Amino acid sequence: ARVVKVENRPHFNNWAARNSGAKHAEGQILAFLDADVILSDGFSEWVGANIGRNNVGKMPSAMSQKTHRDEKLSEASNKLEGVQVMHRDRFEQLGGYDDLLQGWGAGGDMDMVDRLSMNEVEVVTMPETLVEHSIQHSMEERTKYHQNKSTSHTHLVGILYRKSKLALMRLFNKELALEDRKRLHGLAINAATRPTGKNSTHVELLVTSEEIPGANYKTEQKVITTITWQQ
């Protein structure tokens, strides 16, 4: 194993850490794992036989994982969805993980799958048996080195940002520039606090605004992502 030390980062960012690891990796197939995952012996063989340039391997969604069959999912559930395998070309084509996403539950893994899918990369569901064991730990341990320890807040920021970004990417059929993503992420942060006396919050982006010659009106196209709390 080779350990890559990241300098001048007082707080942990999973997606920036993965990007740093990928830069130092030498192979063409990149496997991304969380630190609490212990792989089965057959993991490398399965990946070599099933993952190539035009697909990405991911674990089943948390709700369908057998490991959670008999439990009520909570924030502390070890959902395994951070296990992802992809070809280096595809990873670099997208510029890696979006490291504007910060904190536990922000969804950088789901964001990566969404972006790869937009680029017509097939999503392959990996067998859960490729993970032998996951180390259970508390939320306090999980968020110890994060700047924002409110997992509900970082999760909500992630949803507002990722869904708004994906809508814009589909509209323009391309990745968003860094400055546009920074602006969008800032809007998501501002919107992620539940307003007093209200049960919803939203991110609203004006995409186009056009005055109609000779008319007393204009047209606007907007992207709106709304979160509504269920009492």
Image (spheres, rainbow, N blue to C red):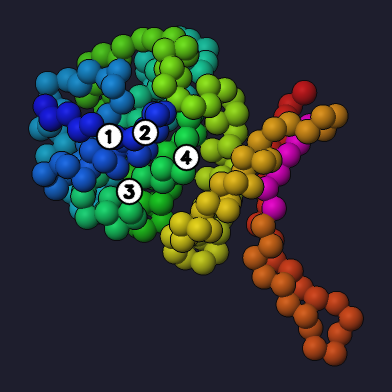
Among the 4 quarters of the image, the one containing residue 124: top left
Residue at the extreme bottom of the image, as rendered: 214
Q: Nearer the viewer, residue 193 or 30?
A: 193
Mark 4 sits on what residue?
A: 101
Q: CA gap, disc 3 to disc 1? A: 16 Å
Q: Position of residue 24 (x, y in %)?
A: 17, 42
Q: Quadrant of the C terminus?
A: top right
Q: Position of residue 223 (x, y in %)?
A: 65, 57
Look at the image and tell me whether residue 85 can be seen.
no
Q: Is residue 213 left or right of residue 164?
A: right
Viewer-side label of 3, 1 = 1
Viewer-side label of 4, 1 = 1
Amino acid type at image mark 2: Arg
Q: Is residue 203 magenta?
A: yes
- Residue at (65, 65) in percent of width and height: 207
Which badge, 4 or 2, comes first in the chain's sequence? 2
- Is the residue marked by circle 4 packed among few (<14), some (14-19), or many (20+) residues within 10 Å? many
In magenta, the rendered stretch is 199-204
- Residue at (26, 14) in percent of width and height: 133
What main secondary structure does the magenta stretch of the protein show? strand
Which badge, 4 or 3, comes first in the chain's sequence? 3
Amino acid type at image mark 1: Val
Q: CA gap, disc 4 to disc 1? A: 17 Å
For mark 3, give the secondary structure: loop
Disc 1 + disc 2, Cβ < 8 Å = yes
Which badge, 3 or 2, comes first in the chain's sequence? 2
Among the 4 quarters of the image, the one containing residue 151: top right
Mark 2 sits on what residue?
A: 9
Number of the label disc, if any, that sits on residue 6: 1
